[in-house]
Image (tube, rainbow, N blue to C red):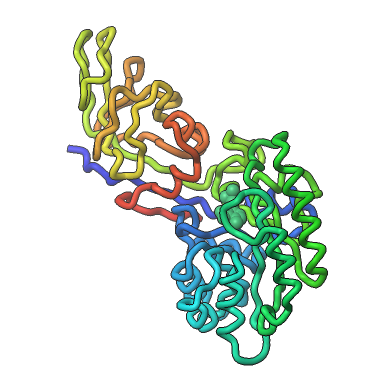
């Protein structure tokens, strides 16, 4: 009997390096500061930061304090700026400083927390300017309050100002240009600070958006900047799983929970050892498909916790133990995500806690 393998997640670090180079060239002279939050979009923050550091990256973004501490520990004595997007609170300021993390200050109370934490000297931080996302950051009115009371910054050195684009993946959305204009205006109030606006998609909006530093995430990890595959971006993650069984589904019979699919003809089916516990969306979708033996094979019925079914009617190669490709160079993460009614971001960050991990090279 064939020995069945676990699902397998392969991380191609050369593809990551190639995406870093592609983004760097698209961003002109701007620094590339990778977003490695959410465990490097599910691919392993320590592993991706290690390779990106070798490629020349010296600034990284994480969301949480805990992610920043873990990244600092994994980088060891290699110098790097680690920016924490959650910012600083009275409870986190000391821990941020102890791990040499730079908060992205998002509000007047956060500025107060960072300022009052320091008793002497000035502690470096970034300032988040809200230019229209209305999620985090100071609005222009609040920046004017801040600049009218400079003692609020007595112990804070704003080394960088940043903002985040809401619609960069829709290049002709009018909010892009509006945010660019508001950012340019607000950033001018901090002439000493470096400026950072673009995420992956922002880099491709044009040279005006690059400023001093860009902060790409998804396109480092294989997602196209606008949610569809992009020839400049290579697949980094490949998720494969073995076929457990091949069977016939007679015409008129259904398959899987809820009997949501009924065969309109006699159908050859492969049952694959992967399901929503491996991070695949449960939602059945008419465009759902899995790559096997040179073609995309339609998903049949619902994805269950550990299993899914695909149509292999015209395929002779299917047998227990053969591996199918759920995400990878033949089934790009953007296409797999679209078919499941989600995004590459969500798909990658949910992948395969249970899969066996391989790292290349
Ligand atoms: C996550 C994040 C990024 C990276 O965005 P991508 O769309 O993945 O390139 C950049 N900046 C901020 C503030 C973020 O939260």
**Image position of 185 with respect to 283: above or below:** below
User: Where residue 186 appears, x then y in whole percent?
Assistant: 77, 60
* Nearer to us in this view, 96 or 350: 96
Q: Is residue 158 left or right of residue 76?
A: right
* Nearer to us in this view, 113 or 234: 113
Q: Residue furthest left?
A: 1
Q: Is residue 278 visible?
A: yes
Q: Is residue 65 left or right of residue 125?
A: left
Q: Quadrant of residue 235?
A: top right
User: Where residue 241 appears, x then y in whole percent?
Assistant: 33, 39
**Image position of 233 with respect to 12: above or below:** above
User: Where residue 250 appears, x then y in whole percent?
Assistant: 20, 11
**Image position of 167 with respect to 297: above or below:** below
Q: Residue furthest bottom?
A: 120
User: Where residue 110 appears, x then y in whole percent?
Assistant: 57, 71
Q: Is residue 50 visible?
A: no
Residue drawn at (21%, 38%) of the image: 2
**Image position of 99 with respect to 135: above or below:** below
Q: Quadrant of residue 339?
A: top left
Q: Quadrant of residue 88?
A: bottom right
Q: Quadrant of the N terminus?
A: top left
* Nearer to us in this view, 116 or 66: 116
Residue drawn at (48%, 70%) of the image: 65
Residue drawn at (40%, 27%) of the image: 289
Tally the numbered discs: 0
Residue drawn at (30%, 40%) of the image: 276
């Amino acid at each position: 009997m064939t020995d069945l393998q676990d699902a397998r997640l392969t991380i191609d670090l050369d593809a990551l390096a190639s995406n870093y180079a592609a983004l760097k060239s698209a961003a002109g002279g701007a620094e590339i500061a990778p977003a490695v939050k959410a465990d490097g979009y599910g691919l392993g923050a320590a592993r991706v930061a290690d390779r990106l550091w070798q490629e020349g990256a010296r600034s990284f973004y994480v969301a949480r304090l805990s992610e920043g501490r873990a990244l600092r520990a994994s980088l060891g004595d290699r110098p790097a700026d680690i920016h924490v997007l959650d910012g600083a609170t009275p409870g986190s300021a000391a821990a941020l400083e102890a791990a040499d993390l730079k908060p992205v200050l998002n509000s007047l109370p956060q500025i107060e927390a960072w300022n009052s934490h320091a008793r002497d000297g000035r502690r470096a931080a970034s300032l988040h300017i809200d230019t229209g996302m209305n999620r985090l950051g100071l609005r222009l009115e609040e920046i004017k309050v801040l600049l009218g009371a400079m003692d609020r910054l007595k112990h804070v050195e704003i080394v960088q100002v940043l903002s985040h684009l809401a619609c960069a993946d829709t290049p002709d959305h009018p909010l892009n240009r509006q945010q660019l204009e508001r950012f340019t205006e607000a950033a001018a109030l901090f002439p000493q600070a470096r400026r950072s606006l673009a995420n992956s998609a922002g880099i491709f909006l044009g040279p005006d958006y690059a400023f001093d530093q860009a902060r790409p995430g998804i396109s480092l990890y294989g997602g196209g900047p606008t949610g569809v595959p992009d020839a400049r971006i290579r697949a980094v993650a490949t998720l494969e799983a073995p076929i457990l069984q091949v069977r016939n589904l007679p015409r008129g019979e259904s398959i899987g929970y809820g009997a949501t699919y009924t065969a309109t003809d006699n159908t050859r089916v492969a049952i694959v050892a992967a399901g929503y516990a491996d991070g695949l969306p449960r939602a059945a979708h008419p465009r759902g498909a899995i790559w096997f033996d040179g073609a995309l094979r339609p998903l049949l019925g619902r994805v269950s916790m550990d299993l899914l079914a695909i149509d292999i009617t015209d395929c002779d190669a299917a047998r227990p133990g053969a591996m199918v490709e759920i995400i990878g160079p033949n089934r790009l993460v953007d296409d797999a995500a679209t078919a499941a009614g989600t995004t590459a971001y969500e798909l990658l960050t949910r992948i395969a806690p249970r899969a066996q991990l391989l790292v290349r090279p």
